[in-house]
Amino acid sequence: NAGVTQTPKFQVLKTGQSMTLQCAQDMNHEYMSWYRQDPGMGLRLIHYSVGAGITDQGEVPNGYNVSRSTTEDFPLRLLSAAPSQTSVYFCASISGAGDTQYFGPGTRLTVL
Amino acid sequence: DAKTTQPPSMDCAEGRAANLPCNHSTISGNEYVYWYRQIHSQGPQYIIHGLKNNETNEMASLIITEDRKSSTLILPHATLRDTAVYYCIVRGGGSNYKLTFGKGTLLTVNP
């Protein structure tokens, strides 16, 4: 298994641009989530999904959209990038049986 | 979910046991204690979790006090590769999978 994969690893955007961060998992996990981590801070939950077709907001959802059309994929869309969205973004999925949350390697986003 | 308190940093000598404390005095009866770690710039890695009994796996041991208001993560023989930020997280059971991360403890293992 590849686990949780994220693309791209690095991205630089200009203010106002839009883009989609990709996240995929091959473990057939129902629950997936997106976090952001700012320098010196812990992770904060952006959006999460408990299964295909079901999404909900986390702690800091503003400026981000998600959808979950398949079990494997959970993309995060930035509608109009702002410098405040400069951060490292982590995607995660969870094994319901073991309650273990697996994290991807992260996407480092800079908005100029 | 209950809030946790951890020291911001700790040091440990290589080969010695690392004992990382966590206070969670407002924990409720159905909330689990989870430990994750984050090695520089990588995604967090699950270590261990428990409800009220002590737990051990290949990575670490988790000691939870009888009143469940605090816990200690023990890395029995710390190596340089264990240098990381360690997060103690309390969350509800069932389908509530949300994890609330604080600032964690930066453990530095010294040669």
Image (cartoon, coloured by chain):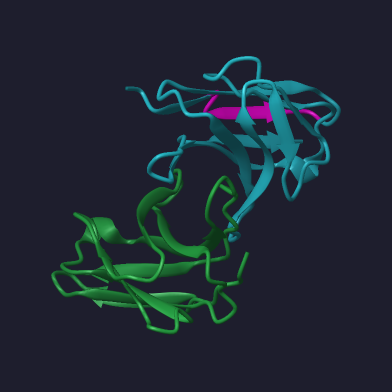
Chain colours: A cyan, B green
Residue placed most toward the observer, A64 or B62: B62
Residue placed most toward the observer, B12 or A99: A99
Q: Is residue A12 magenta?
A: yes
Residue B51: horizontal and vertical position, in percent? 41, 65
Residue B41 vertical placement versus A27 (above, below): below
Picture quarter containing residue A64? Answer: top right
Q: Quadrant of the N terminus of chain B?
A: bottom right
Tally of numbered discs: 0
Left or right: A8 as drawn, with respect to B49: right
In the current view of this chain or complex, which residue is farthest to the top? A69
Residue A42 vertical placement versus B10 (above, below): above
Residue placed most toward the observer, A58 or B111: A58
Q: Is residue B81 magenta?
A: no
Residue A63: horizontal and vertical position, in percent? 82, 36
Left or right: B25 as drawn, with respect to A84: left
Residue A17 vertical placement versus B30 (above, below): above
Residue A97 vertical placement versus A20 (above, below): below
Picture quarter containing residue A14? Answer: top right
Residue placed most toward the observer, B6 or B62: B62
**What residue is at 46 percent from the left and 46 percent from the top?**
B41
**What residue is at 56 percent from the left and 47 percent from the top?**
B97
**What residue is at 74 percent from the left and 37 percent from the top?**
A56
Q: In which quarter of the image is the C terminus of chain B?
A: bottom left
Residue A27: horizontal and vertical position, in percent? 40, 25
> For the magenta stretch, what is the residue range?
A7-14
Query: Majority secondary structure of the magenta segment?
Result: strand
Picture quarter containing residue B18? Answer: bottom left
Left or right: B65 as drawn, with respect to A30: left
**What residue is at 76 percent from the left and 47 percent from the top?**
A60
